[in-house]
Image (cartoon, rainbow, N blue to C red):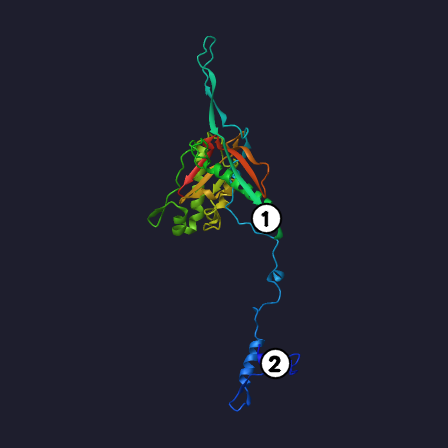
């Protein structure tokens, strides 16, 4: 503050709104000369904003928060659309066994004194391990309170996350089993029959087997090529099951999501591969299993899921999912979730056929 202005105020030279004299200079003779430019610059500086320009209200008050929280998508878990799940035993069991019986013997011409041909039965007991697995969720009081301000139920979110992780683990075991535990999946059970190859077709003097190559070099006939490959796969089932499987049998065709589009390929008559398959195999159901494309290998998986009341295969679990008690700490909570699985139980290998290299 200019001290000369303060002295002026002391002798009564002041105003209620005045804060200083206008800018001036005093020459050698004592004459006062106003500096208009300096005064204008001083007034302009006084008018400038000291605070940051804004909309005058906190941004949170003019921000709409959508109450719907979007969940990130994962690959579909469709193994149970191929084969059913069945609860077997308890999660405390170390292993699981199932029996496979085979009838033997024959007949001969009747004689009062002959009994040399008999009928018998043999039962083999197959053992699988029981794998118990878990996940743990935890949350703190402050963490939960902060989430509540956003209208989020943190405990419920983490429980849903645990449920998803358990489901993904079940699906993964259904596919691949557990290494070193005598537990197998639908893709690596040692009793599965060897996979066959698609039909090689000659187009323009070259041979092609994969559907991508057949599309690139013979798109107009692609639907026919695909129909023929699936029919070849059906032939495997028909050949190996002694007339117990025919075109009207309920069947499930597993195909990856990346290969499923080929089923909509059309031929020169406008017929799709899927349409021709449905027409000739009326009880065929198509299921997308993403894992049927893996490591650059594309697989078709065809099965008759049940024949004469006996399931071809099933996924066995002893505990689908169980939430443990909530443990309270000083200012946080923990909860364990467990499950147990024996993986893929294959009962009739002849009712599954696979094709790789499509």
Residues under numbered marks 2 and 1 in contact, where contact means CB atoms less than 8 Å apart: no
Return the x and y of residue 215 as percentages of the image width and height: 41, 50
Numbered disc 1: secondary structure: helix
Query: Is 225 situated above or below 131?
Result: below
Residue 221 makes an appearance in the image: yes
Q: Image point 38% across, 51% down: which residue?
A: 217
Query: Tag 2: Cα neighbours inside 10 Å, few (<14), some, or many (≥20)?
Result: few
Q: Image point 53% across, 87% down: which residue?
A: 26
Front position in the image: 83 or 49: 49
Front position in the image: 147 or 255: 147
Query: Is 181 situated above or below 203?
Result: above
Which of discs 2 and 1 lies nearer the camera? The answer is: 2
Return the x and y of residue 101 as percentages of the image width and height: 48, 23
Determine the image quadrant of residue 194. Answer: top left
Return the x and y of residue 70 as percentages of the image width and height: 57, 51
Picture quarter with the C terminus: top left
**Extreme-bottom residue of the structure:** 29
Q: CA distance from mark 2 to mark 1?
A: 60 Å
Q: Image point 57% across, 44% down: which residue?
A: 139
Mark before the other along the chain sequence, 2 or 1: 2
11 left or right of 28 in image: right
242 left or right of 66 in image: left
Query: Is 313 situated above or below 25?
Result: above
Front position in the image: 21 or 30: 30
Numbered disc 2: secondary structure: helix
Q: Please give the label number shown on residue 142.
A: 1
**Extreme-left residue of the structure:** 205
86 left or right of 190 in image: right
Q: Please give the label number shown on residue 7.
A: 2
**Extreme-top residue of the structure:** 113
Query: Tag 1: Cα neighbours inside 10 Å, few (<14), some, or many (≥20)?
Result: few
């Amino acid at each position: 503050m200019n001290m000369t202005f303060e002295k002026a105020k002391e002798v009564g030279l002041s105003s209620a709104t005045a804060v200083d004299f206008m800018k001036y200079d005093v020459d050698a003779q004592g004459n006062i000369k106003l500096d208009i430019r300096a005064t204008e610059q001083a007034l302009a500086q006084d008018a400038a904003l000291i605070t940051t320009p804004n909309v005058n209200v906190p941004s949170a008050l003019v921000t709409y928060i959508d109450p719907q929280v979007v969940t990130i998508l994962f690959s579909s878990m469709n193994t149970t659309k191929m084969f059913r799940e069945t609860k077997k035993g308890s999660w405390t069991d170390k292993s699981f066994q199932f029996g496979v019986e085979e009838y033997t013997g024959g007949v001969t011409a009747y004689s009062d004194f002959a009994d040399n041909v008999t009928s018998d039965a043999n039962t083999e007991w197959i053992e699988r391990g029981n794998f118990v697995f878990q996940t743990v969720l935890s949350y703190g009081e402050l963490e939960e309170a902060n989430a509540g301000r956003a209208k989020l139920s943190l405990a419920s979110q983490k429980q849903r996350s645990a449920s998803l992780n358990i489901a993904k683990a079940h699906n993964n075991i259904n596919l691949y089993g557990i290494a070193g535990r005598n537990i197998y999946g639908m893709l690596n059970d040692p009793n599965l029959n060897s996979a066959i190859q698609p039909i090689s077709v000659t187009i323009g003097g070259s041979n092609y087997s994969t559907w991508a190559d057949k599309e690139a070099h013979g798109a107009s006939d692609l639907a026919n090529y695909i129909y023929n490959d699936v029919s070849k796969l059906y032939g495997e089932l028909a050949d190996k099951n002694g007339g117990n499987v025919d075109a009207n049998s309920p069947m499930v065709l597993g195909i990856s999501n990346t290969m499923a589009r080929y089923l909509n390929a059309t031929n020169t008559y406008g017929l799709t591969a899927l349409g021709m398959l449905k027409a000739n195999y009326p009880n065929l159901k198509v299921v997308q299993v993403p894992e049927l494309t893996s490591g650059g290998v594309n697989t078709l998986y065809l099965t008759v899921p049940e024949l004469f009341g006996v399931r071809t295969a099933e996924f066995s679990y002893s505990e689908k999912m169980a939430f443990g008690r909530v443990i309270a700490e000083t200012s946080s909570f923990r909860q364990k979730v467990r499950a147990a699985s024996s993986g893929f139980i294959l009962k009739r290998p002849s009712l599954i056929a696979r094709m790789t290299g499509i």
